[in-house]
Image (cartoon, coloured by chain):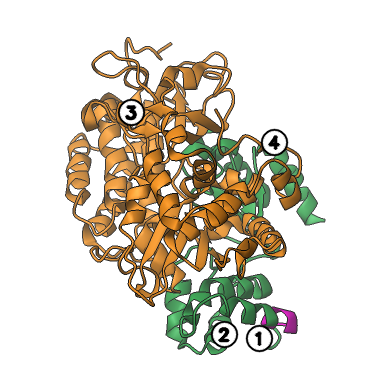
Amino acid sequence: MKILTEHIDVPNIDTIDVFMKHGGYSAVKKALKKMSPDEVTEEVKKSGLRGRGGAGFPMGMKWSFLAKPEGVPRYLVCNADESEPGTFKDHYLMWKSPHTLIEGMIVSSFALGANTSYIYVRGELMYVIAILEKAIQEAYDKGLLGKNILGSGYDLDLFVQPGGGAYICGEETALLESLEGKRGNPRNKPPFPAVKGLWQCPTVVNNVESIAATSWIVNNGGDAYAAIGVGRSTGTKLISASGHIKKPGVYEIPLGITVEDFIYSDEWCGGIRDGHKLKAVVAGGSSVPILPAELIITTAAGEKRLMTYESLSDGGFVSGTMLGSGGFVVMDETACIVHNTLTFAKFYHHESCGQCSPCREGTGWMDKVINRIEHGQGRIEDIDLLVDVAKKIEGNTICPLGDAAAWPVAAAIRHFRDEFEWHIEHPELATKPGAVFMRKGASWTK
Amino acid sequence: MSKIVFPAETLELVKKIIARYPEGKQKSAILPILHLAQAEWKWCSPEVMDYVGTLMSISPIEVYEVASFYTMFHLEPVGEHVIEYCRTGPCCLMGGVEVYDHLKKRLKINTGETTKDGKFTIKEVECLAACGWGPVFQIREKYYMHLTNEKVDQIIDELSK
C-alpha cells in the first residue's frame, strides 16, 4: 500500500504534466470545488493521521486548535527542516516528487484558511529548494496557486524559506523565530503557535510527510486512510533506513508490519549485510532510545514488535523506544555503541541553542565525558555521572532538545553498560582501531 | 575584494524575496539574503554583513547575531571549495571516519583548515539528512554520496583541474 511514493519512480514525476497525468492535483480540485474547509479538516481528523515529524500528535486535532479571529491572517508553515540524525525521508520525497508536497500544501492551507504559506527547508538542501521553487512556479502557471485557484475564489501564495543550518529550527517555535529572521531560540509555550505563531498570528506547523498525506485523505476519505495500519497507528509511514543493512533507503510501509519483517524482508531492508548479525537499532531518529537486537525484534513480554507508535514504545523507556521520525538506524556487531553514542552526544552539544542552562551545559558535559571514555581516559564513576547529567537535563528545558539529548545517552548505558565498562577497564584494547566489545553469549557475538 | 554591492540581477531577486513577507516583516528575508551574499563573496565578512544590514534597513548587530547562530554561514575566509562532511552516527557506521581521514590526508589539512593554494577548506558538519546514502559530504549545494577513498580522490582530482 503506497500513498506518498506510488509514482515516485516514474520518470519526470517532478514535472507538473507527468504528475497530473498520474492523478496529481485531483485533491486540490476536489477540496476547493466540492468541499468546505471544515469538511477537509473532518476527513483529516477521521484519518487518525499523526504528526510524522516525530511527535506523533494527531494532525486533525492540531488543526482544530487553530484560532480563527476575524481579520487576522492565519498561516500554514511546513516543517522541512529535517535534521534528526537517521532521518532523510522528507529530503527524498521533496527531491523526487516536489508536487506531492505542494498539492498537500494547497489542500491543507485551504482547510486552515491560510492565504500565505511557507515551506521552511533546511538550508543545506539548496538543490531541493530549487526543485521546489520550479515546481511551485509550474503550479502557479497552471492556476493551482495564486488568486482564485481553479475559479474557487480561494487565494494562496506559497513560498520556500531556506534555513541556515540549525537542528533546533525543526522545533516548531524555533522554526517560527527563524522564519521571522531571528536566531532559532525556541519560545516558551503557551501561547502555542495555534494562537500566536508566525508574526504573532495563528499558525499551524506540520511536517512534510504529514502535509503530503492530506491529498490522499481528501481523495479517498479519512476512513479509508484509517483502515490502513493498526489501532491508533493509521496509514503509511516513510521510514528512513540506514546503517548495516543490505538495502538502505526510504521505504513507505503500512504501519503495523513487524520490525523483523522490516529488517529482514527483501521488500524492505533486505536483512543485515552478508556475514554479519544484528546488534542494535535506533528506530526513530537519534533521539529515541537505542535497543539491543532481542528487544527490537520482540518486546520484553515476548510479543513480536510492530512498526507502530504503540508497539515500539511498549515497555516504556525500560525496554521500549519510539517510532519518532522513522529514522531507522541498524547496527551490526561491528558497531561500537560508545562511539555511536559519542557522535550523537557531539551532535546535541553542537545543536543546543544555548538558551537553557541544563541543555547548554549538560550536552557539553556528556560530550566531554563520553569522549574521554571513547579515548581510553574514562573513570568507572563516569557512567553514573552520565546517567545523572542526563537526568538533570531531561524535562528541565524549554523545548524537547534537552530530552532528545538525554535519552540516547541514558538508553545506551541502560542496554550496553558492559560496553562502557569495557572501554574504561580495558583502554588498551578499546582504543585500537576497529576494536569492538563482544558481549558473552549475545546473539550478535561471533 | 571589490566594492560590496550585489549585481543588478541579484538586487532584483532580493526585492522579490522581501516581497514574500507582509509589510513590516522584511526581517524574515535575512537568511535567504545571507545565502545570496555568501554565494557572491564566499564568506560573510563584517563588511558583507554590514551591507546586508543596509539592504534590509536593520542594524549590523541584527545581522551578526543571526549569521553567527547558523552553521552554514562562514564567518572566516574559506577556500574556493568548501567540503563539508557529515560526521554524525549513520555516516560513521558506513565508514565515514576512514573516508574523511583519507580526505584530510589527501589535502594535507585538518578539519577547519584551508589548503595553502586556497583551493579547499574542510569543515565538519552535523547530519546532512542523507543517512542512507552515506558517507556524505557537500560542496556548495551539491551532495556527494556513497563516498569511498577512490571517489574522494576522483572528486578532488576533478576540482583541482
Classify mark 3: helix, strand or loop.
Answer: loop
Q: Indicate the position of residue A384 as horizontal and vertical percent values.
A: 18, 37
Residues at marks 1 and 3, CA–CA distance in whole angstroms: 60 Å
Q: Chain of mark 1?
A: B
Same-subunit check for callouts 2 and 1: yes
Residue depicted at 36% across the width and 68% down the height: A202
Residue at image mark 3? A231
Q: Chain of mark 2?
A: B
Q: State the residue in front, A432 or A140.
A: A140
Please give the label number shown on residue B47: 2
Residues at marks 3 and 2, CA–CA distance in whole angstroms: 58 Å
Magenta range is B5-11
Instruction: Give the amino acid at mark 3.
Output: Gly
Q: Chain of mark 3?
A: A
Task: Give the tally of numbered discs.
Answer: 4
Mark 3, other Cα within 10 Å: few <14 / some 14–19 / many ≥20? some
The quadrant of the rendering that contains the C terminus of chain A is top left
Residue at image mark 1? B4
Residues at marks 2 and 4, CA–CA distance in whole angstroms: 46 Å
Residue at image mark 4? A9
Residue A132 placement: quadrant: bottom right
Q: Indicate the position of residue A48 as horizontal and vertical percent values.
A: 37, 39
Chain B shade:
green
